[in-house]
């Protein structure tokens, strides 16, 4: 780099780096040497320029001896240069030369350097790069100068970023420590420099930067005295102290270091040796370091440790820590964190009174810090967290990303969540938050969430904490909260929230932090003053009296005493001393600030001003923002804050800036920009804030708000909007005086803040922001900014409703309505009321607003005769449905009219009010009306629910269940096609609960209900998800599922409903749970529901307002009372339920009500009064008729019920044989249909009937079967009643709960129980062949038999063990397939040993067994475990693993024997089920193969129908959807590297249109990562079984395309190449969007066969197209050739005829012209024939070259001479430019042919203008160019002019065969040359021929390269 700066000369470069070049120059004026440091041009120039400006600014303000002095900052030619004094020619590194200094010189230089550093630190400057190369030493005077201040700063407390020279930087400077960088980093670097001065080498040496950083962090340097024995130990100790890893262990000041070095220097000078002395005594004298240990809270700390242990193994807890301000609440939690470092994850948040209305601010801070920490992890460690978070959050990732902005960087930018109703949104947010926390809370590492200063918590945060505290399934989370007890009154919202938590049963504990007692204070003083307890005891007692034991007060008082000189360090005695009498006279008040005021007032004025401004900040103070508000530079502000830090008022913060400055001054340090600070204690900030006058506070807040608006990006503004508007809120006294634009801008900001608060469910905060926005909104905004005004009113009204301020909401909407002119906008406002009133359960209010909205849309809701209106609408719908199949209905178009879509949405909201208020007629009207609209105007997302609801209504009203089934299935399919999980949830629920069971078995509704739950949670449709969870539990109960399992499902659903806040459904499930417990004999009284935790009276009182729940409870009571023999209660409950039975009619519990009411009537009728008998019989027959209708429609569900009631009626009517037949039929049907409770009941009633007839033996058979059946079902109470009622009944075995318990019979009792267990298990296992159901039953039986808590079943498959089922006593069995070694549910070593040895393994106490080191045993603190191999004969097919974590020795040997006896039965059953599964798979594979053959046959037909491959491929794509895929795309290779999408098909028309549009906007690129493109490029199929978001990013060309791909929700992709003649000509891409879809080998094989056939079809079509083209070319050529040949022949013939006629009298000139013409035509004819022959020879490869030495110029002149006549006739003169002969070895004849063809073309197309020929020779290459000025060649024809039969112009106008240029090209190529053409239409054409003269061209220049230059 050369540099010239005016005024300087003799530039000598002395250093060059990546950023700077350094010159030594001479000043022209004085001749003085100077140093110029100039920016090095390149990629680092911009950064280097900023740093050089910063260095100049730093040095300009320093007047420190020993620091290089700046002279000027110059800019020359855009290059910045800093001119400096020349400090000397040698730096310390060169001076040392890797050799140590002798002691005297070392001390001399060390004292100089330390003095320089001391001066810098006293001026608040940290150098940050002290090293020998930055210390310049003058050899003559030994004067040291410190240089290079690029990284220097005045900001202390920076985050390390590896700035500086690696061999010398401090550990905290590497950025690898959780430490901030302050002035002590300079002392470490100084220590490393001194180390090198003493030893000749740095403390750590390595060429590897990573190893060097690790050494600074983790290795201790070798003591200098060991490397150089001549070094005094004191000097070695000084250096080692400077090199301490922890800053607290180093020298704390350069002043103390200098004093020690001077003491060593004096000792050396006086005695020649350095005597030992105490180091760093001055540090202790100048600074009082108060011990930061925890005192007096041992008991409280132990309580927290116990709480953490409890959550470590169980549910979460809440611990509240109370106490006065400064009592040590936070210190207690920080000490807990210190003790549990690595064993628990801690998150900290702190509320602040300046948070204003900011929702969840500390939680955002805490979780944001957690995510930022994760982002710093390496990619391999980050990936598992990313996967866990994505799985846990699912569709809630969007809402959490808005809550925690950093999460988007971790998970990728998720789609924005759909706007939802308030309660739904709140539930969604709380669920998402719980799921997020649960990811980080595990048994191995629990999570501690600490929220400090809860007395300032906002309502939203308290509600969120309440949801966490009461979440039943949140585990391993310890919620800690601290608040000041004196600031929380009885009406405080915190105490109200705690009361709600307590009432909800949350585990809530309170710890009160006491003040320090005398003993604790003595220990604190002892540790702080480093003396004995006896000496500090009087001082401690005095401090206790003055501070009442408040730790914060004590520490401030000690610091105050030190500053006042009442507590001093005695240097001579090396101890602290104090004056008790003077301390006793110090006046101390309760206000701590009064102790600090003197210290604050001693601070510089700028520091005081900055402190006042900082007190207006919320939480951390960003230095860049503070400096901007103060109007000072960052460095000035940082320097001014040093004194505040030294006084203990501020501390640097470690989290980094909360805002990134949008712009910074070019002279400011990038490091200083990131500095942040916070007050040592919030009491200090509050007191400083209180000192500010009110007007000044407001001014500062306004200034902060403005600076934030100007200084941060738009995205960050959105993330931090709360802080911005809060500053404006606190800075505005009123809106008066604000201009229109400013008011509008602030109103918009408040709207953004309100919207963001709504997104996190903080509706109270949102309402405050929105109301502020409304207050600021100018009245004229309705005209100029209508949308903003409407949004503010609308959102504020929603929040008002959600916070219970309904009057305010109505007022807001009434204010808005006069300004809204569009009906759709008005309807939106009405809908707010509808949804809000539904949420608040004011259903009538919602319906009233619905009427208003419908009226506005021209739809009048019938006020009267609603039944007639429903009938009319139903008739219209029936007419529209008539004759239409399900497929035709699904093919209907989508609704397009925005008004109709708004109407459908509005009605879908209003209809919910009718549903929840049990107005079924109104509900029916809405649904039928919506279906009517859908059939007339097209489908919308809301149509699906209408279809399913109308299906339910139709079935119940008319009994037309077939049509109902068709409509219900249509609705389900429609909901899936629209891919709206909310509508899918609603639709699936209606179908599963009210339609499906009329025509399909109950069990088919189970997966529908589970999917409805999942869709509801995905789509945040929590109300209907709750209904679906309830329906699932009801279905399982009604199906006769074992009551223990049904009870577990009830409990699980209750947990979900509690989380969702679904009160009604929770009430209904409580009824089912108690019914189950009643049947299990677990309630206090038979046939009643009371137990220890449930009061039936209180329950009934709580559900009276819900007729549906009350009715279903009464229906349940009918069943339990009937089964347990209380007929009177059953009859009473039946009659009570009858008034509301219409609510249950469509549902399965309504069917059970009819069934058990009929049985109750039949049982009661014989004993009823005579007056009632006929009525009862009539009712019974009516119920029987209903059951008969249902049984004929779906015998799988209802046949046994109908037969059993019919048997009871036959018994009453005396039809004995008919009754017997029907009882047996009912038993058989119940068994066949898998209704065990109905089978047991049928046996019960049959037995009773036979018993009444006196057939006791027959009765006993039925009754025994009934007892067994009820026992298997789990109805212990019913089985016990039967045994009690029929004492003569001898059962083959004793019931488990009726066995004797005497000690004498213990062994036989155990044997009988074991036998019962074996028989029960064998019966259960032998009757099941479906593997999944077998595994489920097997797991349940084994848990019961062994008495285990939980367990897993492992099967040997594919050469390894897999966990196939796992279960526990509290949860249903879960089926999975996971490798056992990676499973978190089994100990792998124990399981492997059991399998390999074939022997059972019993661990009585796992922690003391040989498997105690197994990771699973350690992490789960396992107590008892059992592993039993599943064996048959000699082979082992799996392992049964069981555990009990409640006690050791839980598995006795007899339990193991029972399981071993069952082992062979297990193996046989598993083998049978696997065989059955294989058979089922084979059948399915055969069916699939048949379908595949049919599909391929159809595809072959389609492929053969047309030779237009575009049409063919479109049909193939249509055929592939939906058989092979949900979407199909076909790509074809048009030209090399050019792909074209020729066909697209999708099952969804909307998605097909979207895919077409995306392909149009983003055509496939050859280098794309799309599977279809890769398949074409590689010729290999591409199968992606599971598509992740990362893969979608790889596929996508840009963000828009990525969003399109995401919208398809692609689950699996397959792309197969189209191979024809061993070439890839295209691909077929298949996309599957169906959940759980995975493409496999069978799919690939089928797709490849389809692709093979399609490729053949394409190839045939292309061959046909090429053949057609060849025929066309042949015909065209023959026509042209004949014309071209006949033209000269005709001319010759005419010439000869003329000569014959005029032979005697012709003049000589005429004869001459005739002969001349003849020669011309002959030559033309010869040329044509030669062209044809040449082409033939060229094609046959028969061109033989006769090479000889020829002159290209001579040949050219000869050819030109032959064309003289033609050129004259055409008017195109031919000019030749050739200076000298150009000789070469060529074929003369062929060369003439080339020139002839080129010249003929030039003359023909020359447009009567000159033709120029140029011949030159250069570098062994001959160049011939033929230039015409004619018509030129079109650009699209130019690439093809050298092809056969190609003409660039019309044959009619110019003629020719199109062979001349082709022949010329081939001849030139054969001669080793090249031919090139350049042409411009209308300007002319130039052909250039390049030929090697004798040998290949010299200098590596090829012919083709030369052609490129031509």
Image (cartoon, grey):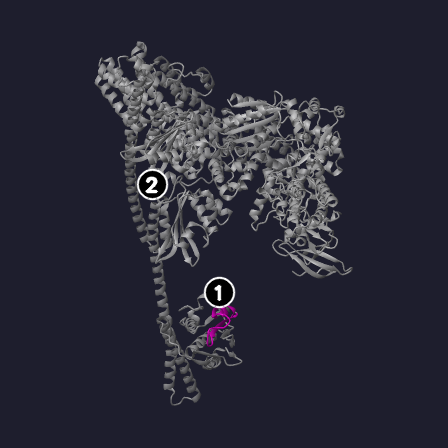
Q: Secondary structure at mark 2?
A: loop
Q: Which residue is mark 2?
A: 1359
Image quarter (top left, top right, bottom left or bottom right) of the N terminus: bottom right
Q: Which of these two is toward me, 1830 or 1790?
A: 1790
Horizontal placement of 307 versus 1282: left or right? right
Residue nearest the viewer, comparing 854 with 354 = 354
Residue 1144: horizontal and vertical position, in percent? 39, 23
Q: Nearer the viewer, residue 452 or 767?
A: 452
**Rendered position, 1108 above or below 819:** above
Q: Determine whether label 1 and label 2 are within 8 Å by CB.
A: no
The secondary structure type at the circle numbered 1 is loop
In the figure, is residue 1896 to the left or right of 529?
Answer: left
Answer yes or no: is residue 27 visible: yes
Disc 1 versus disc 2: distance between alpha carbons? 66 Å
Q: Residues within 10 Å of mark 1 (few under 14, many from 20)?
A: few
Q: Would residue 560 be visible to someone looking at this image?
A: no
Foreground label between 1 and 2: 2
Name which residue lies at 73% across and 57% down. Answer: 34
Residue 1886 placement (x, y as % from top left): 50, 72
Residue extending farthest right: 30
Could you say where residue 946 lies in the image, as x and y percent from the top left? Answer: 42, 32
* Above/below status of 132 relative to 688: below
Please report the bounds of the magenta region as a residue range.
Answer: 1883-1910
Q: Determine whether, in the image, residue 1352 is placed left or right of residue 721.
A: left
Choose between 329 and 470: the one closer to the eye.
329
Picture coordinates of residue 1166 (x, y %)?
A: 29, 12
Task: Point out the tag, 1 or 2, that comes first from the N-terminus.
Answer: 2
Q: Indicate yes or no whether the magenta region holds residue 1578.
A: no
Mark 1 = which residue?
1835
* 1897 inside magenta stretch: yes
């Amino acid at each position: 780099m050369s540099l010239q700066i005016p005024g300087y000369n003799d530039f000598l470069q002395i250093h060059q780096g990546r950023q700077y070049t350094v010159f030594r120059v001479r000043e022209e004026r004085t001749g003085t040497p100077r140093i110029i440091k100039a920016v090095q041009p390149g990629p680092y120039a911009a950064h280097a320029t900023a740093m050089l400006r910063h260095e100049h600014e730093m040095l300009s303000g320093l007047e420190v001896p020993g620091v290089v002095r700046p002279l000027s900052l110059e800019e020359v030619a855009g290059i910045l240069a800093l001119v400096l004094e020349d400090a000397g020619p040698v730096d310390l590194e060169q001076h040392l030369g890797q050799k140590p200094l002798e002691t005297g010189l070392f001390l001399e230089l060390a004292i100089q350097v330390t003095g320089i550093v001391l001066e810098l630190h006293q001026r608040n400057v940290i150098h940050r790069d002290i090293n020998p190369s930055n210390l310049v030493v003058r050899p003559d005077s030994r004067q040291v100068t410190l240089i290079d201040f690029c990284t220097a700063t005045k900001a202390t407390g920076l985050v390390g970023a590896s700035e500086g020279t690696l061999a010398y930087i401090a550990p905290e400077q590497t950025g690898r420590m959780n430490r901030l960088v302050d002035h002590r980093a300079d002392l470490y670097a100084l220590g490393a420099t001194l180390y090198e001065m003493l030893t000749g080498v740095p403390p750590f040496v390595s060429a590897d930067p990573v190893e060097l950083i690790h050494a600074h962090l983790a290795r201790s340097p070798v003591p200098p005295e060991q490397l150089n024995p001549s070094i005094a130990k004191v000097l070695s100790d000084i250096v080692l102290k400077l090199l301490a890893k922890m800053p607290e262990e180093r020298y704390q000041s350069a002043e103390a270091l200098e004093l020690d070095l001077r003491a060593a220097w004096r000792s050396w000078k006086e005695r020649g040796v350095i005597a030992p002395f105490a180091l760093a005594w001055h540090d202790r004298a100048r600074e009082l370091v108060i011990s930061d240990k925890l005192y007096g809270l041992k008991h409280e700390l132990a309580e927290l440790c116990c709480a953490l242990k409890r959550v470590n193994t169980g549910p979460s807890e809440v611990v509240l820590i109370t106490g006065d301000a400064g009592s040590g609440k936070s210190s207690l939690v920080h000490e807990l964190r210190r003790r549990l470092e690595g064993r628990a994850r801690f998150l900290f948040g702190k509320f602040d009174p300046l948070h204003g209305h900011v929702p969840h601010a500390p939680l955002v801070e805490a979780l944001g810090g957690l995510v930022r920490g994760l982002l710093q992890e390496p990619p391999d460690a980050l990936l598992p967290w990313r996967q866990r978070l994505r799985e846990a959050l699912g569709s809630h990732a969007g809402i959490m990303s808005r809550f925690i902005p950093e999460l988007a960087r971790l998970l990728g930018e998720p789609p924005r969540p759909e706007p939802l109703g308030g309660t739904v949104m709140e539930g969604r947010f709380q669920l998402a938050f719980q799921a997020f926390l649960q990811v980080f809370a595990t048994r191995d590492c629990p999570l501690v969430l600490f929220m400090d200063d809860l007395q300032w918590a906002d309502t939203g945060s308290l509600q969120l904490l309440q949801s966490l505290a009461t979440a039943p399934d949140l585990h391993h989370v310890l919620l800690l909260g601290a608040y000041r007890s004196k600031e929380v009154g009885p009406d405080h919202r915190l105490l109200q929230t705690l009361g709600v938590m307590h009432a909800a049963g949350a585990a809530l504990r309170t710890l009160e932090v006491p003040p320090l007692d005398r003993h604790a204070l003595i220990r604190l003083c002892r540790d702080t003053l480093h003396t004995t307890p006896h000496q500090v005891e009087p001082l401690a007692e005095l401090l206790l009296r003055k501070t009442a034991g408040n730790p914060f007060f004590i520490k401030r008082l000690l610091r105050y005493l030190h500053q006042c000189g009442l507590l001093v360090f005695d240097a001579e005695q090396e101890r602290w001393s104090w004056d008790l009498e003077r301390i006793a006279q110090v006046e101390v008040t309760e206000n701590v600030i009064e102790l600090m005021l003197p210290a604050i007032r001693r601070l510089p004025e700028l520091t005081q001003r900055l402190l006042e401004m900082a007190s207006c900040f919320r939480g951390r103070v960003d230095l860049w923002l503070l400096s901007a508000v103060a109007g000072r530079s960052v460095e000035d502000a940082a320097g001014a804050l040093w004194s505040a830090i030294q006084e203990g008022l501020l501390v640097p913060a470690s989290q980094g800036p909360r805002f990134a400055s949008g712009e910074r001054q070019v002279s400011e340090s990038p490091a200083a920009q990131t500095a942040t600070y916070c007050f040592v204690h919030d009491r200090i900030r509050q007191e400083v804030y209180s000192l500010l006058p009110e007007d000044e506070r407001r001014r500062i807040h306004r200034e902060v708000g403005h600076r934030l608006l100007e200084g941060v990006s738009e995205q960050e503004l959105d993330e931090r909007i709360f802080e911005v508007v809060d500053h404006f809120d606190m800075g505005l006294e009123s809106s008066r005086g604000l201009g229109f634009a400013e008011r509008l801008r602030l109103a918009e900001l408040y709207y953004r803040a309100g919207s963001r608060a709504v997104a996190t469910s903080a509706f109270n905060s949102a309402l405050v922001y929105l109301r502020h926005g409304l207050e600021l909104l100018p009245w004229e905004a309705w005209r100029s900014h209508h949308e903003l005004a409407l949004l503010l009113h609308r959102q504020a009204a929603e929040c008002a409703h959600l916070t219970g301020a309904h009057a305010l909401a109505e007022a807001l909407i009434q204010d808005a309505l006069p300004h809204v002119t569009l009906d759709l906008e008005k309807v939106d406002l009405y809908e707010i009321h509808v949804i809000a009133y539904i949420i608040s359960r004011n259903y009538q209010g919602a319906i009233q607003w619905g009427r208003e909205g419908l009226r506005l849309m021209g739809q009048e809701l019938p006020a009267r005769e609603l039944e007639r209106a429903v009938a009319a609408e139903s008739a219209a719908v029936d007419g529209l449905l008539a004759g239409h199949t399900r497929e035709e209905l699904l093919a209907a178009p989508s609704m397009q009219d925005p008004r109709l879509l708004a109407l459908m949405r509005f009605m879908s909201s209003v209809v919910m009010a009718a549903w929840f208020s049990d107005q079924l007629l109104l509900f029916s009207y809405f649904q039928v009306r919506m279906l009517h609209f859908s059939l007339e105007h097209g489908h919308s997302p809301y149509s699906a629910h209408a279809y399913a609801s109308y299906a339910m209504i139709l079935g119940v009203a008319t009994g037309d269940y077939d049509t109902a089934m068709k409509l219900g299935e249509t609705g389900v399919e429609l909901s899936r096609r629209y891919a709206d999980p909310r509508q899918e949830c609603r639709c699936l629920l209606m179908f599963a609960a009210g339609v499906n069971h009329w025509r399909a078995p109950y069990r088919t509704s189970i997966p529908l209900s589970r999917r409805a739950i999942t869709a509801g949670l995905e789509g945040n449709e929590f109300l209907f998800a709750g209904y679906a969870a309830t329906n699932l539990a009801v279905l399982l109960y009604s199906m006769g599922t074992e009551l223990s399992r049904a009870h577990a499902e009830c409990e699980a659903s209750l947990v979900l409903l509690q989380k969702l806040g679904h009160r009604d459904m929770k009430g209904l499930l409580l009824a089912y749970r108690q019914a189950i417990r009643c049947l299990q004999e677990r309630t206090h009284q038979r046939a009643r529901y009371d137990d220890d935790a449930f009061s039936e009276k209180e329950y009934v009182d709580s559900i009276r307002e819900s007729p549906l729940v009350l009715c279903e409870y009464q229906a349940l009571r009918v069943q339990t009372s009937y089964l347990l023999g209380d007929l009177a209660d059953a009859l009473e409950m039946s009659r009570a339920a009858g008034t509301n039975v219409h609510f249950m009619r469509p549902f399965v519990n309504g069917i059970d009500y009819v069934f058990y009411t009929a049985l109750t009537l039949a049982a009661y009728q014989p004993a009823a009064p005579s007056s009632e008998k006929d009525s009862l019989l009539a009712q019974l027959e009516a119920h029987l008729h209903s059951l008969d209708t249902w049984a004929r429609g779906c015998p799988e569900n209802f046949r046994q019920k109908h037969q059993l009631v019919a048997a009871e009626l036959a018994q009453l009517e005396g039809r004995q044989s008919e009754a017997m037949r029907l009882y047996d039929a009912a038993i058989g049907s119940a068994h066949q249909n898998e209704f065990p409770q109905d089978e047991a009941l049928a046996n019960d009633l049959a037995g009773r009937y036979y018993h009444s007839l006196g057939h006791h033996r027959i009765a006993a058979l039925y009754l025994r079967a009934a007892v067994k059946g009820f026992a298997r079902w789990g109805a212990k109470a019913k089985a016990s009643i039967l045994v009690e009622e029929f004492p003569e009944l001898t059962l083959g075995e004793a019931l488990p709960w009726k066995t004797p318990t005497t000690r004498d019979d213990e062994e036989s009792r155990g044997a009988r129980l074991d036998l019962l267990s074996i028989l029960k298990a064998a019966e259960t296992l032998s009757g099941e062949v479906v593997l999944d159901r077998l595994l489920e039953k097997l797991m349940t039986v084994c848990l019961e038999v062994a008495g285990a808590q939980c367990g897993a079943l492992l099967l040997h498959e594919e050469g390894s063990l897999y966990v196939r089922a796992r279960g526990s006593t509290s949860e249903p069995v879960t089926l999975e397939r996971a490798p056992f070694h990676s499973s978190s549910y089994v100990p792998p070593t124990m399981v492997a040993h059991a399998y390999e040895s074939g022997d059972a393994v019993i661990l009585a106490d796992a922690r003391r067994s040989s498997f105690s080191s197994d990771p699973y045993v350690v992490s789960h603190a396992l107590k008892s475990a059992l592993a039993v191999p599943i064996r048959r004969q000699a082979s082992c097919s799996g392992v049964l693993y069981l555990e009990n974590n409640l006690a050791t020795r839980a598995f006795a040997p007899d339990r193991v024997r029972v399981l071993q006896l069952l082992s062979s039965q297990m193996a046989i059953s598993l083998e049978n089920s696997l065989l059955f599964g294989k058979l089922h798979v084979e059948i399915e594979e055969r069916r699939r193969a048949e379908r595949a053959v049919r599909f391929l046959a159809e595809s072959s037909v389609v492929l053969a129908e047309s030779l237009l491959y575009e049409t063919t491929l479109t049909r193939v794509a249509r055929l592939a959807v939906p058989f092979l895929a949900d979407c199909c795309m076909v790509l074809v290779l048009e030209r090399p590297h050019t792909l074209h999408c020729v066909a697209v098909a999708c099952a969804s028309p909307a998605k097909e249109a979207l895919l077409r549009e995306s392909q149009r906007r983003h055509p496939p690129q050859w280098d794309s990562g799309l599977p279809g493109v890769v398949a074409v490029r590689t010729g290999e199929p591409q199968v992606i079984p599971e598509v992740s978001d990362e893969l979608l990013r790889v596929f996508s060309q840009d963000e828009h395309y990525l969003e399109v791909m995401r919208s398809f929700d692609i689950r699996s992709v397959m792309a197969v190449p189209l191979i024809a003649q061993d070439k890839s000509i295209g691909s077929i891409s298949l996309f599957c969007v169906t959940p759980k879809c995975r493409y496999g080998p069978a799919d690939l094989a089928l797709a490849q066969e389809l692709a093979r056939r399609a490729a053949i079809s394409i190839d045939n079509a292309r061959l046909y197209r090429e053949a057609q083209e060849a025929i066309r070319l042949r015909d065209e050529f023959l026509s042209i050739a004949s014309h071209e040949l006949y033209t000269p022949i005709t001319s010759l013939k005419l010439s000869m005829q003329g000569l014959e006629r005029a032979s005697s009298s012709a003049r000589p000139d005429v004869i001459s012209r005739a002969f001349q013409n003849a020669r011309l035509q002959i030559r033309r004819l010869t040329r044509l024939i030669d062209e044809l022959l040449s082409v033939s020879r060229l094609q046959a490869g028969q061109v033989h070259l006769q090479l000889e030495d020829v002159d290209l110029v001579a040949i050219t002149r000869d050819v030109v001479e032959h064309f003289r006549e033609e050129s004259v006739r055409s008017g195109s003169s031919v000019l030749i430019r050739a200076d000298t002969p150009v000789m070469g070895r060529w074929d003369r004849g062929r060369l003439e042919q080339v020139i002839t063809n080129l010249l003929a073309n030039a003359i023909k197309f020359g447009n009567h203008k000159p033709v120029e020929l140029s011949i030159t020779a250069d570098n062994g290459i001959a160049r011939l160019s033929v230039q015409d000025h004619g018509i030129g060649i079109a650009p699209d024809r130019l690439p093809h002019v050298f092809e056969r039969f190609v003409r660039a112009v019309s044959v009619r106008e110019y003629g020719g065969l199109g062979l001349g240029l082709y022949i010329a090209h081939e001849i030139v190529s054969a001669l080793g040359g090249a031919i090139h053409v350049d042409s411009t239409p209308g300007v002319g054409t130039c052909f250039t021929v390049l030929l090697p003269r004798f040998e290949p061209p010299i200098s590596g220049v090829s012919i083709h390269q030369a052609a490129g230059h031509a």
